Image (tube, rainbow, N blue to C red):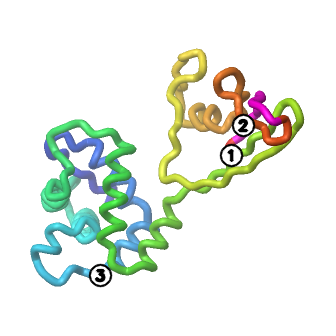
């Protein structure tokens, strides 16, 4: 059989897209299948990972082309995710992410989830006057990809956005950094890897 879709409830197309991204990831669903099932019905109705697991099972066992995520939508409503408003995908992802992590009782599953979705980046800064270098390691859950280049031209593909995000950038003018070796603000080259 083909992939099973989700019916939109309210203006939930953004939510449905995010759910599909989560539920089509076999590593995520592997984690989901090992959650601790909440003991009572009230807790099960309010538990996002459990409701996502039920939805996954509906999608895998269903014989229809799409299923209605009503129980999960009610669960999310109880956690202040409104159904009849447009959502920013990144904000909704972070909200879902935080609910899932908070409601998972097994710490090893939370760690696996973090390992699965955390993006590790390194920001490399080099002074253009003396070549003093700084490396800053950080992690994030989403990449803030630009949709416009520095001349306000639209970046057309995801690949274009990624190339632009990882392109080296000269930090000049108001964006200059303080160089410890020069003892003042100087132009720097910034590279993200």
**Which residue is rendered at x = 66% and y = 54% of the image?**
137
State whether residue 124 appears in this view.
yes
**Which percent across, then down, holds residue 124?**
74, 44
Q: Earlier in the sequence, mark 1 or mark 2?
A: 1
Q: How many marks?
A: 3
Crowding at dot 2, Cα within 10 Å, few <14 / some 14-19 / many 20+, comes out as some
Q: Is residue 68 magenta?
A: no
Which of these two is toward me, 92 or 132? 132
Vertical relation: 112 (above or below) 84: below
Estimate the spatial distance between the alpha carbons at disc 3 and disc 1, rounded to whole Å. 38 Å
Magenta-drawn stretch, dominant element (helix, strand or loop):
strand
State whether residue 68 appears in this view.
no
Estimate the spatial distance between the alpha carbons at disc 1 and disc 2, rounded to whole Å. 7 Å
What is the span of residues highlighted in magenta in the rendered image? 183-191
Q: Which residue is mark 3?
A: 36
Mark 2 falls on what kind of element? strand
The image quadrant where one finds the N terminus is: bottom left
Question: Residue lying farthest bottom?
Answer: 39
**Which residue is rendered at x = 72% and y = 37% of the image?**
190
Which of these two is toward me, 159 or 146? 146
User: Of the numbered discs in the image, which one, if any, rests on residue 123?
Assistant: 1
Q: Which residue is mark 2?
A: 190
**Which residue is rendered at x = 50% and y = 28% of the image?**
147
Vertical relation: 116 (above or below) 6: below
**Which residue is rendered at x = 35% and y = 42% of the image?**
89
Question: Residue lying farthest right?
Answer: 130
Q: Are the two marked residues, 3 and 1, in contact with CB atoms closer than 8 angstroms?
A: no
Horizontal side, residue 183 vs residue 162: left or right: right
């Amino acid at each position: 059989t083909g992939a099973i879709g989700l019916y939109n409830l309210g203006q939930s197309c953004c939510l449905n897209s995010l759910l599909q991204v989560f539920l089509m990831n076999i590593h995520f669903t592997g984690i989901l299948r090992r959650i601790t099932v909440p003991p009572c019905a009230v807790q099960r109705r309010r538990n996002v990972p459990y409701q996502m697991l039920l939805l996954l099972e509906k999608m895998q066992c269903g014989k229809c082309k799409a299923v209605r995520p009503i129980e999960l939508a009610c669960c999310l409503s109880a956690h202040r995710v409104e159904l009849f408003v447009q959502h920013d995908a990144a904000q909704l992802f972070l909200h879902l992410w935080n609910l899932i992590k908070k409601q998972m009782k097994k710490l090893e599953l939370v760690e696996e989830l973090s390992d699965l979705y955390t993006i590790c980046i390194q920001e490399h800064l080099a002074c253009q006057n003396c070549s003093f270098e700084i490396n800053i390691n950080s992690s994030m859950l989403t990449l803030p990809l630009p949709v416009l280049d520095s001349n306000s031209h639209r970046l057309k593909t995801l690949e274009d956005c990624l190339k632009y995000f990882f392109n080296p950038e000269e930090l000049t003018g108001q964006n200059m950094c303080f160089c410890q070796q020069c003892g003042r603000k100087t132009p720097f080259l910034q590279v993200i890897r």
